[in-house]
Amino acid sequence: MKPSSFQTTIENQFDYICKRAMEDERKNYLKHLSKISKQEVSFSDTGDYLINQFSTIDSYSIDLQIFTLNGFNIGVENDLLGEALQNLTDKKRNIILLYYFMGMSDAEIAKVLKLNRSTVYRHRNSGLAFVKNFIEEHTE
């Protein structure tokens, strides 16, 4: 039995509607992929700054050289810097630790250690010169 022309027309219309729906869905999907690709970035294309925002580094007290000063424990990560600080006199080490690790000014350090501000300044500069020379000698 041969289909009627009306039935053939209906089948053709249904076929067209199905193909059109699939084509529209394909276009929507490609548009969605295009939108996502504009927002997403591959990890290989990201810079170190962005990657470091999502990463963490564990630090353990075993890795630090600990200096105790006025009840505070100050940890130094760099072994060479810690060794240089160990070789300083107590007064110079305390001044450098208070200035650079505790963020105190010369006047505040002078008040804590009961010294003149100019003495603190001199000890800090001579201590830094010693640390610089120590590090330069040991990195060659």
Image (cartoon, rainbow, N blue to C red):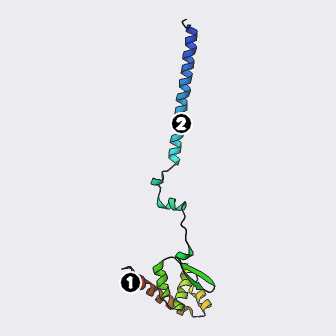
CA distance for labels 1 and 2: 64 Å
**Residue positioned 48% across, 77% down in the render:** 78
Relative placement, left or right, of 39 versus 129 is right
Residue lying at the far right of the rendered structure: 71
Q: Is residue 102 visible?
A: no
Closer-to-camera residue (131/122):
131
- State the image quarter where residue 97 is shown: bottom right
Q: In which quarter of the image is the N terminus?
A: top right
Q: What residue type is labelled 1?
A: Glu
The residue carrying mark 1 is 137
Q: Quadrant of the C terminus?
A: bottom left
Q: How crowded is mark 2: few (under 14 residues within 10 Å), some or many (20 or more)?
A: few
Question: Where residue 72 appears, x then y in whole percent?
Answer: 62, 82
Q: Which amino acid does label 2 sit on?
A: Tyr
Question: Where residue 50 appears, x then y in whole percent?
Answer: 51, 59
Question: Where residue 16 appears, x then y in whole percent?
Answer: 54, 21
Q: Residues within 10 Å of mark 1 (few under 14, many from 20)?
A: few
Question: Where residue 20 appears, x then y in whole percent?
Answer: 54, 25
Relative placement, left or right, of 131 versus 67 is left
Closer-to-camera residue (108/21):
21
In the rendered image of this protein, does residue 111 appear above or below residue 74? below
**Residue 94, label in figure:** none
**SS at badge 2:** helix
**Residue positioned 56% across, 87% down in the render:** 106
In the rendered image of this protein, does residue 100 appear above or below residue 17? below
**SS at badge 1:** helix
**Residue 29, label in figure:** 2
In the rendered image of this protein, does residue 69 appear above or below residue 48? below
Q: Can residue 105 be seen in this view?
A: yes
Closer-to-camera residue (3/22):
3
Residue lying at the far front of the rendered structure: 62
